[in-house]
Structure formats: C-alpha cells, structure tokens
Image (cartoon, rainbow, N blue to C red):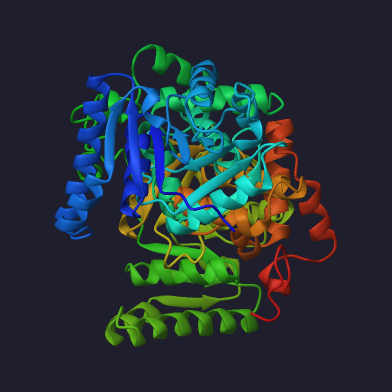
Amino acid sequence: MAREFTRVGVVGLGTMGAGIVEVFARNGLDVTAVEISETALERGRVTLTGSTDRAVAKGKLAETDRDALMARVDFRVGLDALHDVDLVIEAVPEHLDLKQRIFAELDRVCKPEAILATNTSSLSVTEISVATSRPNQVIGIHFFNPAPVMKLVEVVRTVVTSADVVADVEGLCARLGKVDVTISDRAGFIANALLFGYLNHAVGMFEARYATREDIDAAMKLGCGLPMGPLALMDLIGLDTAYEILDTMYRRGGRDRRHAPAPLLKQMVTAGLLGRKSGRGFYTYERPGSPKVVPDEHTPVAADAAPADGARAVAKVGVVGSGTMATGIIEVFAKAGYEVVSVTRGAEKSATVCEAVKTSLNKGVVRGRLAETDRDAALGRVTWSATLEHLADVDLVVEAVVEELSVKKALFASLDEICKPGVVLATTTSSLPVIDVAMATQRPADVVGLHFFNPAPVMPLVEVVRTIRTSGETSATARAVCAALGKTAVVCGDRSGFIVNALLFPYLNDAVKMLEASYSTADDIDHAMKLGCGYPMGPFELLDVVGLDVSLAIQRELYLELREPGFAPAPLLEHLVTAGYLGRKTGRGFRDHTNR
C-alpha cells in the first residue's frame, strides 16, 4: 500500500518553491511553507498570491478554490515547523553545502518515517543524502518551472533510495496530475543534460559573432518549432542559474567541454547581467522581472527601415532539381509572383514535378488557403524544362539537387557558363560547405546559401549562408528575396550545420547516447523533453521523422568539421543505420512504425 501524504513541507519560497507549494495545495494537501526570515516569507507569500490571482483572472481557478488553496498553506519561519510533515521538499539555491546543511537539520527535525526530497536540477542527490542518517529515505523530485503548469517531474533515485520511497513518490506525482519519469542520480538528469549542452552551444555561437542573438533565437523557433529561442530561454532561466548548472554538469559529467560554461556566460554573470530578473541579459527588458523586451544598442534596424544595401532586382528565378525540396521551392516562388523556370534531368521528371506542384496547390484551394484564380496564376508563371540553357536570362538560380558535393560543383560550373553576369547563384545545401560550391565558378561573390526547410511552402525560415567570398550585394539580394517570399531570413556564416542543424543534431545525438547507456527509455526521454521543455516532438520521435541516415550524415559532417569529441556520432545511431532501421520511411527506427 502506498503511503498517504496529508501534510507536506516546502523549504525555500522563491519562484520554484512557491510554485511547488501551489501544486501541493491545489491538490488538497496541507502545506507548511518555510523560509529563513519574515522578509523572505513575505516575498514567498506575495509570489504565491500573485500566481493564484492570475489564475483566477484567466478563469483557470475559481475564487473559492483560490481561497481554499491559500487556507491550506501555513507560512512559517524556521525548519522546526516541519516536525510533523510526511514529506518535505527543498527548493533553495543550487549550492551543495547549503543543501547539505538543510538536510542535516531536516534529519534532526522531521519524524523518522518522513521522506526528504530535493528539487535540485543538477546537484548530486546522493551527495545531499549522505548529510542525513536516513539516505534510503532521500530522493530527488525535480519539478519544472513554472511548477503549476509544467506536467513533468523527474523522480531521481540514488543507489540506496528505498523502493518503497520511490513508489510512494510516483504515487504522489500521479495524485498531483504530473507525468513522472524515474531515473538514477546522474548529472543533469534527463532534461537538463540534453538542454544545457544545446544552450551553451548557442551562447558560444553568439559569442563568436557567428549570428546575431535575434537570428539564433528565430532560427530555433521557426526551424524547430521550439517555444523559445536558446538565448531568450537563458534569460528566463537566469544566467547565474544556467552557469551553476553547466559548471556542475561539467564537473560531475566527465568534464565534457560542451558543458564548460562559455566564457561570455561567466562575464555576464560577473557583470550582473542575469537575464529577466536583473532587467538585462542577452536582451534588455522593460524592468527587472519583466518579460517585455525593449530595444537596446544591439537591436537590429527594422527591415522596412533598413537601406537596400544594393540588393539586385529579381523577377525571374530558376530552380534546378526534382525532389521534394525543389517542388516546394517552385511553389513558393510561383505563389509569390515570380516567373519560375523549373529545370530537371528529363521530360519525365519535369512532368512528375509539375504534377506534384499542381497537387500541392490544389490542396491549398481545397483547404481554403488559396483562391482558384491564384492557383491558376501561380501555375501559369512556371516554365517546365529539361535543359540548363533555359536559365540564361534568369536573375536568381536556386539549386536543390542531391546532397553530393561533386554533383553540386559540376552543376555550378555549368551555371557559371550559362547564366548572365550578376545572377545570384544559390544552393539549398543543409550540410555541405557553400564555399566549395562557390569556387567551382568564376564568380564566387555571387554565390550564397539559401537553406529552405521542409516543407518549403509551410516552413517560415530560410538560412542565408554567406561565404567569405559572398558580396554584400548578393547577401542583400538573398535577404530581399526571402522577405518578398514572406519568409524570415536568418544570416550566418558558412560553417557545418549553419545555425539550426549545428544546434539541433548534437542534442539529438546526446539523446541517443543517453538511451545507449541505458539511463532511460526512449519514451521517458521523449516525455522529458516535450513535457519538461515544451518541445513539439521528443528527440526519438524527431529522429524517426528526419531519418536516421540523414541524421547520421549531418552529425558526421559536424564532427569532421568541428573535431569536438562530444560530437562523435553515437554508435547506436550508426548500428541502426547499418541495419537498415532508418525511421518512418523504412517502418522502423527507434520505434516500430509498421503497425501505426
């Protein structure tokens, strides 16, 4: 029989602690809420009151339920007030010595059968537990911020945590309406171990001036569907908190360089630029604690106010290729009013591409997103061809052929001979060096990367990739064309993975390594990232959709260029690809899709 919890204690009433108090009290539990002083206690009371009042204002909580919730909370100063609780959860700052002192005191104060829990997101639960005489009754219960909203709880057992304690806590999570994933005590657990390497990589990308903060954040929101960009998320978490988590993960997790906090992060923390709570971090906010971003000296000039920078006029566009991406790009340009010349390797392929474009446009009509007259006009703008010579008078060529460097170089060498001077030559490569393609021509200044995302008619992002030879005119033209297409352009240098893939695929690779180490299951890892971080898909869902062979190829390119040991492809990923388990397209990847 699972134990019945009637009164619980919460130590520390900051944002997280107050949120945990609200979760318990909302679900009928009496709560003793403890702080170190009357001043801190009052801050915690204000935080809880503000949260519940907002819930009432939004219609998510009735006033009577709010009043009942507040009546269940006993605000007290000092740990002695916790002598009769069944469970106490600590939510104080992430400092091991502080937590150990608190647990030693809780061990003295709390009744012998009470469970002692920590909400730590990065510290060793085992090291905290040994400060007590009952380490078998110590467990991690890691809520996510904001606790009343986020569904995930990581239940962290040590090697000596009693199985009964784990079962009791899992039952409590169910009572609270949370989804729990039970894992062992390892640096970062699931969510932070996967999240913070990605966040730190994004800070390094910004620190190296590879892309602007706005472009990095826009790329991950629009290219991956994430709720926030990495730099905005760092500001929300708090740069000091992020630094402590990364530093702890680096020291506890095998000293992986990707978890060594980026130097810029330490500098910003030292300067007091802590994110939203201080009013300034990677962005500047209206006031400390405000979510509203205000312009500062790094804010880019609005697109409509920016000078044209010598952008060339583009009226006619050539698209080379016959795959899904080429088909989508043809549709995008034709709907935006451009004359389009579609070039494939034969009449049969041209007919197939034409039919695919018609089918897609017809779907838009059926769904009420496109008028029949607009569909007909878009189709009327496309010329179907099987010869590159028909690109002699276009203003822009977009190449979307197979991802093989030799094929692309040969194509660009031909385009160099055929196309008129001043034409922008663009490649849609997602992983190959754009400069290699550019140097196959006699006009590398006119070559740029235009990385559309699949499906091109739907995805709003385009990565504009400049090489060291790309001219300002060419970059400006690419940005202007993206704007005319209704796409958001983010500008970056010619480096493996550009922005999105460089940040996304190491995270996916880390998830595979976590599974490979038998730390957790694919289902629990997916749950952790969807429910704990708000990701639209878990890493294994996404890998099966993208294709394990595609993912492995991108990860190999990243590893070969950056030579970062942590980027080495996970052996499990390589084995699955070798076995032909490539994801949904073959019916099996990390999951079996044959009966779905």
Name the quarter where the C terminus is drawn: bottom right
Q: Pick whichever, 167 or 581, lies toward us.
A: 167
* Camera sees residue 8: yes
The residue positioned 22% from the left and 58% from the top of the image is: 61
List x then y, in percent, for residue 152. Answer: 48, 51
Name the quarter where the N terminus is drawn: bottom right
List x then y, in percent, for residue 539. Answer: 60, 54
Q: Looking at the image, is 467 positioned above or below residue 102? A: below
490 relative position to 257: left or right:
left
List x then y, in percent, for residue 421. Answer: 47, 49
Q: Pick whichever, 128 or 401, lies toward us.
A: 128
286 relative position to 148: left or right:
left
Q: Looking at the image, is 542 positioned above or below residue 371? A: above
The residue positioned 49% from the left and 20% from the top of the image is: 105
562 relative position to 94: left or right:
right
377 relative position to 438: left or right:
left
Query: In the orientation shown, which residue stands out farthest toward the top?
Result: 270
Marker count (numbered): 0
* Camera sees residue 427: no
Q: Quadrant for residue 57, please give it.
A: bottom left
The residue positioned 71% from the left and 34% from the top of the image is: 566
List x then y, in percent, for residue 463. Answer: 47, 48
